[in-house]
Image (cartoon, rainbow, N blue to C red):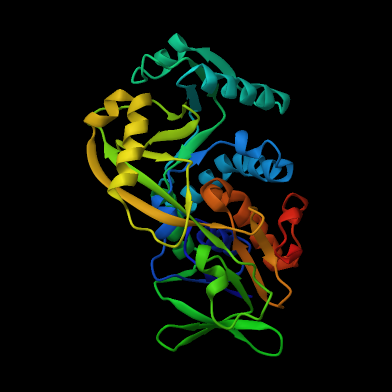
Amino acid sequence: MHVVIVGGGVIGLATAWRSLVAGLTVTVLDPEPAGKATAVAAGMLPAGNENLYDQELLLRLCIASRDRYPSFVAELEETAGLPAGYRRDGVLEVAYGEADLAVLNGLRRWQENLGFAVEALDAEECRRQEPQLAERVSGGLLNPDDGSVDPRTLSAALIAAIGRLGGTVRAERVTDLLVEGDRATGVRLADGGEVRGDRVVLAAGVWTHRLGGLPTGIVPEIKPQKGQTVRLRAERPFLARTTRGLVNGRSVFAAPRLDGEVIVGATHESRGYDTTVTAGGIGELLDITRELLPGIGELEFVGAGAASRPGSPDGLPVLGPTALEGLLLASGHGRIGIQLAPVTGDVMARALISGELPEVAKPFSAQRF
């Protein structure tokens, strides 16, 4: 079986690698492999946060992916011969004030009820964990089983593993889906060429539903969710682990990389395809982060990026076969695509072979719309 995957972000690459492991032939097409949303992402890996309070099914998928990450990375690094940039050294969540601490205490109780390992810390213990934290920090939580991954390093390992297993990643833009006799048979490229396949997977993020040639109603609208991150560099380790803070109700985070970089971002997002990096957005992000980590203003500025992350109509991932024979979707992950990459890769490889989704992924079927 030859699988054509449209989209070379982390979701498309994870799907390609796991499909190759399963014995399929794979071609990935993307004008900028591992670019766009994947390149900008911070790579935090929290399995359970306040955004999942009323999302039991998505929570199960997140937990399955968190539990899969260590073996996923170990196998990937062995195949690729490269590091994947994965760290499972915990995530520290801290509160800037008493109101923020009340929110974190509610999160702790919820996590404890789910059986998560979580430790409540007072202000002094938080600063002992991370000396860079502001004096005003009032307490926090340590989640020792969580961690982070560098999406750029992860993507490089995925591309290397795909090549070593005989797959192909081509930096070409797809313009149209080819449909013959009520079946997807391949894609047309911007230069007029075609790539034929037995199956086509659309993993093109916010461009998934904008591909030419799609029959009406087959693919739901994938809405863009803009996010910005800032890349900084420290001469010596600035943070021991990924740190997320609530500052007057606003969530910000700083994720240290193994090479000395620190990625700063916020969970706030706006709608739209515009991915312009704005001075106002960067300034606001750094201002609120300095409230939490005053010393961050002394770090070297490396760069900033913005990207549109893919959101489905109901805010949940869109996975598996569509109503059009031979066409599958892997999109709609919003801002947790890096987090869900391992489980998505496994789910999509199984769906390509059997036509079925495993139980944990059935609520996210592409045919629910």
Res 117 seen here: no
Q: Quadrant of the C terminus?
A: bottom right
Image location (x, y in percent) of residue 234: 25, 32
Residue lying at 63% horizontally and 50% vertically, measured from the top left: 343
Query: In the image, 132: left or right of 88?
Result: left
Q: Quadrant of the N terminus?
A: bottom right
Residue 134, quarter of picture: top left
Image location (x, y in percent) of residue 72: 56, 46
Residue lying at 34% horizontally and 51% vertically, measured from the top left: 305
Where 219 sits versus 164, above or below? below
In front here: 304 or 64? 304
Where 305 sits versus 261, above or below? below
Res 186 seen here: yes
Residue 217, quarter of picture: bottom right
In front here: 311 or 202? 311
Residue 230, quarter of picture: top left
Query: In the image, 209: left or right of 358?
Result: left
Residue lying at 48% horizontally and 34% vertically, measured from the top left: 251
Image location (x, y in percent) of residue 172: 41, 75
Query: In the image, 193: left or right of 14?
Result: left
In front here: 136 or 69? 136
Number of on-image labels: 0
Image location (x, y in percent) of residue 269: 48, 47
